Image (tube, grey):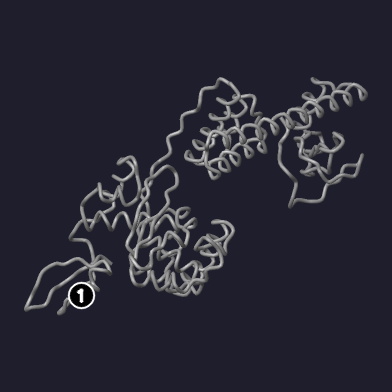
Amino acid sequence: MWGLFSLTGQESVHCPHCGSMNVWKDGLRYTLKGDVQRYICRECGFRFSSRRLNDKALSKAEKQNRAAAYWSERPLPLAEGKALNEKAAGATETTQLNMSAKLIEFLWWMKKQGYKDTTIKGKSSRLRRLVKLGANLFDPESVKEILATQPWSDSGKETTAYAYDLFAKYMGIKWEKPTFKPARKMPFIPLEREIDDLIAGCNNKTIATFLQIAKETGARAGEIFNLKWTDIDFEGKTLRITPEKGSNPRVFRMSGKLIGMLEGLPRKSETVFGNYKRLKDLAKTFERHRKRIAYNLGNPRLLRISFHTLRHWKATMEYHRTKDILHVMQMLGHKDIKNTLIYTQLINVEGDEEYICKAAKTVEQASELIEAGFEYVCEFDGVKLFRKRK
């Protein structure tokens, strides 16, 4: 099976028959003088050879072995070989066109079945990657071979297998899905001051506001990106989250800091972050700011903070504060408590934790501390003491 990958970024290769640069590698030919790279033109189907990849002299024994292998399988006559090459190229082209057509039909079927656009895009990306690697979507064994030989993680292989499993059901293809057991890793939980450093260091108001919302609500990045101005109640100081991935809707109370950041954003579109066309574009901008801030502060831990990291952090802090797993489940919008139980394992031993301690003498000071996430500990000499985990 010849490889299905482009030669972009490598040396320029032209078809000697039609001059096209749309050529793919077609395996190696082993000769007595070294290995020769074979190519196939995707425009006219012409096969040709390039220069030798290895010009070093072969030993006498190697020459004899290659000569024996060569003469044991004599090549076909020129005319017959050319006819077979043209037939194989035509058959391969037909298979590629059929797979592309069926893949488009499959994606449209997913759309009609009510699958989300993000899900459809993810499945399409996985299946097209299989095709580029040489898999025949009509042959389950070909797909299994690609999954077995790729250096992907078990999680990536499992996701790709699920994508093909849905395609196979649509096509009526019987196959036995391979079993992959991805290792479940504990999420990284940063310190609150590291999150605050990241927000303060963003000179882009939009990115800083996005991070502040993620910190206060623990919402998914997609839910925050789709936030509309009508979802924000400045008078009642509340923010409504429209769920994705089948989770539950939520309402959160906003801090004074977040309200001020939202009021400072321009309202040029229906959505709060409408100046970015895609979440991917916003994420790339965030990554550039994160890299700069981590370098300036000399803290490489900041590079491990992503949008979803703030969701993990919020859930962990809420469970630490309330010890109520059902409250955390409702806050995250989970429908299965199994997805929430992981946050019970992220709380450190009480004696190993570090806290920020604050004192309040008036009701106003106590209110500000509570709004900032501090919890009441005790009262000493008429002063109320509060604490918050670093």
Residue placed at 49% from the left, 57% from the top? 225
Crowding near pointer 1: few (<14 within 10 Å), some, many (20+)?
A: some
Task: Give, as a three-letter code, the residue at label 1.
Answer: Lys
* Quadrant in which residue 134 is drawn: top right
Instruction: State whether residue 319 is above or below residue 65.
Output: below
* Quadrant in which residue 168 is drawn: top right
Quadrant of the rendering where the C terminus is positioned: bottom left
The kind of secondary structure element at disc 1 is strand
Quadrant of the rendering where the N terminus is positioned: top right
The residue labelled by disc 1 is: 358
Instruction: Give the image location of residue 26, x and y in percent.
Output: 77, 35
**Total count of labels:** 1
Instruction: Give the image location of residue 303, x and y in percent.
Output: 46, 63
Instruction: Give the image location of residue 321, x and y in percent.
Output: 22, 58
Instruction: State whether residue 1 is above or below residue 121.
Output: above
Instruction: State whether residue 335 is above or below residue 263.
Output: above
- The furthest residue to the left: 381
Instruction: State whether residue 280 is above or below residue 162.
Output: below
Residue placed at 56% from the left, 42% from the top? 122
| Pick the front one: 102 or 38 | 102
| Pick the front one: 25 or 260 | 260
* Quadrant in which residue 28 is drawn: top right
